[in-house]
Image (cartoon, helix red, strand yellow):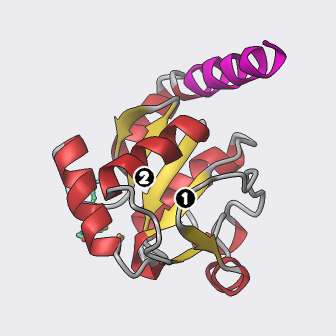
Amino acid sequence: MSWRSASSVGRRLVASGSSLAWRRSAAGAAGSGMGNGTSSSVGKSASTPVNQIQETISNNCVVIFSKTSCSYCSMAKKIFHDMNVNYKAVELDMLEYGNQFQDALHKMTGERTVPRIFVNGTFIGGAMDTHRLHKEGKLLPLVHQCNLKKKQEERS
Ligand SMILES: N[C@@H](CCC(=O)N[C@@H](CS)C(=O)NCC(=O)O)C(=O)O
Ligand code: FES
């Protein structure tokens, strides 16, 4: 595969206005060099993993459930990075309850693998699916649709 390593990937961060019980970790972000560093769950949220995932995907146009060590995840991030699209990366290997989140993702998407990628609140697949959508020219329209929706919401 021609995709490069994560070092150049996803330096732009999405807004951190999420109400998740996940703390942003500066060390995580710097260490991984991959988009948002999300670290341990503080475990204070009464919300279930499924609910927290749902909240995250409705608050962010692009969410990549990822692991810092995973090259497939880096590939997926690079697609969005190269399109100049902000994404939120949730690094499951940095979360105390990452396994539970992976179980929840399994329930929601039918697979437990990473990456699990959501655009505009909808599951679009893993790295290969995302790559395919991009090649077919279908990925950016999905993102634009979401950005437009967000802008309209802000105005109302
Ligand atoms: N075809 C899938 C491959 C996904 C996959 O095999 N992911 C591996 C890591 S590369 C995985 O999640 N393994 C189990 C785990 O890490 O929990 C895609 O394009 O995303
Ligand atoms: S590429 Fe090996 S863990 Fe994803």
Which quadrant of the figure has residue 130? top left
* Span highlighted in magenta in the image: 140-156
**Residue type at numbered disc 2:** Gln
Locate residue 152, reporting x and y percent. 75, 14
Depth check, front residue: 62 or 3 = 62
List the residue tagged with mark 1.
Answer: 20
Please tell me whether residue 127 belongs to the stretch shown in magenta: no
List the residue tagged with mark 2.
Answer: 52
Q: Are marks 1 and 2 in contact (CB under 8 Å)?
A: yes
Whether residue 17 is situated above or below residue 101 in the rendered picture: above
Is residue 63 shown left or right of residue 19? left
Whether residue 51 is situated above or below residue 137 in the rendered picture: below
Residue 78: mark: none
The residue at 37%/47% (across/down) is: 51
Which quadrant of the figure has residue 34? bottom right
Locate residue 103, reporting x and y percent. 20, 61
Depth check, front residue: 21 or 140 = 21
**Residue type at numbered disc 1:** Leu
Ligand 1's image quarter is bottom left
For mark 2, give the secondary structure: helix
